[in-house]
Amino acid sequence: FYIAFMLVLVVLIFRAVTLEFRSQRPGRTWRSAWDVSFFVSSLLLALLLGVAFGAILEGVPLFEDGEIRTTLFELLTPYSVLIGITAVAMFAMHGAIYLMMKTEGSLADRARRWLPYLMIGFVVLNTLGVVVSIALGLPFTERYLEQIWPVIFPAGALLAMGAVWYFVQQARYFNAFLASSLMILLLLVAGAIGMHPNLIVSSVDQAYNLTIYNAASEENTMTVALIIALIGMPFVLLYTTGVYYIFRGKVRVEPSSY
């Protein structure tokens, strides 16, 4: 299990390396090789995150001592792979919308041509994931089958997805990007609501589940962490807002571009 997360870190580092090395030589072959490397690393990152999320939803062999004893290949169940592919489609759709918002010319045209297929693919895969989750009787679906109010989150995600389609048809790509971001957020919240209070579900014994209660630190530790977060988060938000403001508008892609 830990190997999977180490692979995520390796892929994240390699993505940054590809961007740095791509600009070191002007040759077409050199840049194309690093473009392919960036694509593969980005694809693997989305797939690994999706597989990890699917494994957490499905349950992992968590034992009484708090150790997860499994291998990477054992995590690659049909369900986790389905969620991984769904994550790839979701991030590809989200990225295509961003490209249409930030670029122009041939790159934006390519994103525009691919976007309808990516949207349809994501909706189909996500719907299949929901059906399979219910059919398998996964623990996180019980709350939705027993209670009504949590349904507002997946329903909100569905409405946000409809808004994405509408705004794309209207060529209002910034609004489409915001709607897509909201949709992703609502899907994550829907998963968290279904899992609550569990953080990791044990496939060995439900008594070994890792919850927000048995995984919590001491009260004074959480108090200090909260104070630091309250102080630091405004600076993070300010920095992020400043970056997006400075680099607002469309980017012109030229042969000399980084």
Image: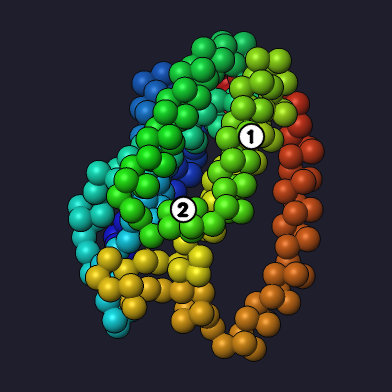
- Residue 241 shown left or right of residue 176 in the figure: right
Label 2 or label 1, whichever lies nearer to me, is 2
Residue 242 or residue 167, whichever sits in front: 167
- Residues at marks 2 and 1 touching, judged by CB atoms closer than 8 Å: no
Mark 2, residue position: 145
Q: Quarter-wise, where is residue 220 in the image?
A: bottom right
Residue 249 or residue 168, whichever sits in front: 168
Q: Residue at x 41, y 74 (%)?
A: 210
Helix, strand or loop under label 2 = helix
Q: Quarter-wise, where is residue 157 in the image?
A: top right
- Residue 37 shown left or right of residue 232 in the figure: left
- Residue 50 shown left or right of residue 105 in the figure: left
- Residue 226 shown left or right of residue 47 in the figure: right
How far across and how far down the image is residue 108, in percent?
59, 16
How far across and how far down the image is residue 28, in percent?
41, 18
Tell me: residue 35, above or below residue 17: above
As drawn, the label of residue 160 is: 1
Helix, strand or loop under label 1 = helix
User: Which amino acid, by three-letter code, is at mark 1?
Assistant: Ala
